[in-house]
Image: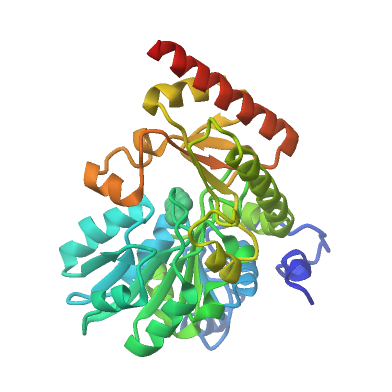
Amino acid sequence: MKKQTKAIRIQAEKSQNREHSVPLYLTSSFAFESAEQGKALFEETEEGNIYSRFSNPNVTEFVDKVCMLENAEDGIATGTGMAAVFASMAALLKSGDHLVACRALFGSAHQIITQILSKWGITHTYVDATATEAEWEAAMQPNTRMVYLETPSNPGLELVDLEMMGRLKQKYGFILNVDNCFATPILQTPIDFGADLSVHSATKYMDGQGRVLGGIVVGSKELIQPIRFFARHTGPSLSPFNAWILSKSLETLELRMERHCRNALQLAEALDTHTDVERVLYPFLPSHPQYDLAKRQMSAGGAIVTIELDGGFERVKAFFDALTIPTLSSNLGDSRTIVTNPNTTTHAKLKPEEKAALGITPGLIRISVGLEAIDDLINDFTQAVEKSAEVVKEKVV
Ligand SMILES: *Cc1c(COP(=O)(O)O)cnc(C)c1O
């Protein structure tokens, strides 16, 4: 069966009520039918739920679906994407280990690496996402235990060559850990390129409607086992309610991603030809510096389009004022189109040289393209581009 069929048909076992839609197992614990059963469950000679910090039917259903989509053996769901990122690192790294990561990281991942892991004697080296194989190799140390990547990156949409990283993993034996949030398993499956782990903020496209927080890490049984131990005892568990929402949302993930990506490509093409737009970045635009790589490792370009407008923050303000459909928010991966100015919001705290390394300029705008009718989006963005260009020109005169 195709993945789309399985994403709809994988389901927690029916109760005696023969419900069609999976019920919400909003329960903190599970009862034992006998003293023997309690003993067997704790001895793990019998499989079953004990306590929702360890497992829960709604959470298991969500994990089973993501494992299926990612071609992974096993997984652990968490309350947020950051809990998944942190668990994948904290469970597998120890004092004295070295981590290599791409420079363009989600802000909180950067904070974990530089402010938290560093307290425990775990060192790191950052490498540009677009670095050559030799540059990645130069970052390797005898104690390099993990390589952590985001591809495509936020907000610069730089890609890391997953096939190359899979090759380097064979040579150096590190754990290859990929944040696959931007691509989703619909567009890219890192495990097929040799990644050991794929982590997600399920808050984004997996939910897709901006309702709940969630996270997940999937990978080989061998690596998930210590992460499960870590999660079971430190408690970053996903709530059954959120798991129920997320599992339902996975039924429509492929359908939504198709529309998200089609809208994003059409909007990127429309803005790319507009003389009042300085630059348009989108992995599936032939003008993207890594277009060929994008075509090799992703089945579509994703739903983030990054544009640059001339005229600094004044232009950004005028542009945002003129837009009528999108929401101004720092979130992404919603059915509703969202715009952000990374320089003054998500990346505001970076030092000027860090911003320069990531290409964060004052006029940069990240567009999380939603599911609205594409004609409405193109019309709205076009009029706002033109209106804001006029406003800035008038101020200069
Ligand atoms: C949002 C996001 C995260 C963090 O996820 P939360 O669910 O907000 O904790 C991690 N990585 C990427 C790429 C993200 O976009």
> In front: 247, or 351?
351
Quarter occupied by the C terminus: top left
The residue under the point 40% across, 68% down is 231
Placement of 114 over or under 347, stated as above or below = below
| Residue at position x 52%, y 73% in the image | 190
Q: Position of residue 237 (x, y in %)?
A: 46, 60
Left or right of residue 28: residue 100? left
Q: Count up the numbered dots.
A: 0
Q: Is residue 333 above or below residue 187?
A: above
Determine if residue 62 is in view.
Answer: no
Q: Is residue 389 visible?
A: yes
In the rendered view, tell whether residue 382 sits above or below residue 214. Answer: above
Work out which quarter of the rendered image holds the N terminus and state it. bottom right
Q: How is the image coloured?
A: rainbow
Residue 84 lies, in percent from the top left, at: 43, 62
**Image: 179 above or below 219:** above
Figure quadrant of residue 69 = bottom right
Q: Which x, y percent locates residue 89?
A: 33, 69
Find residue 274 and report its image quarter.
top right
Q: Percent position (x, y) of residue 331? A: 49, 41
99 displayed left or right of 221: left
Q: Which quadrant of the figure has residue 311?
A: top left
**Residue at position x 73%, y 55% in the image:** 252
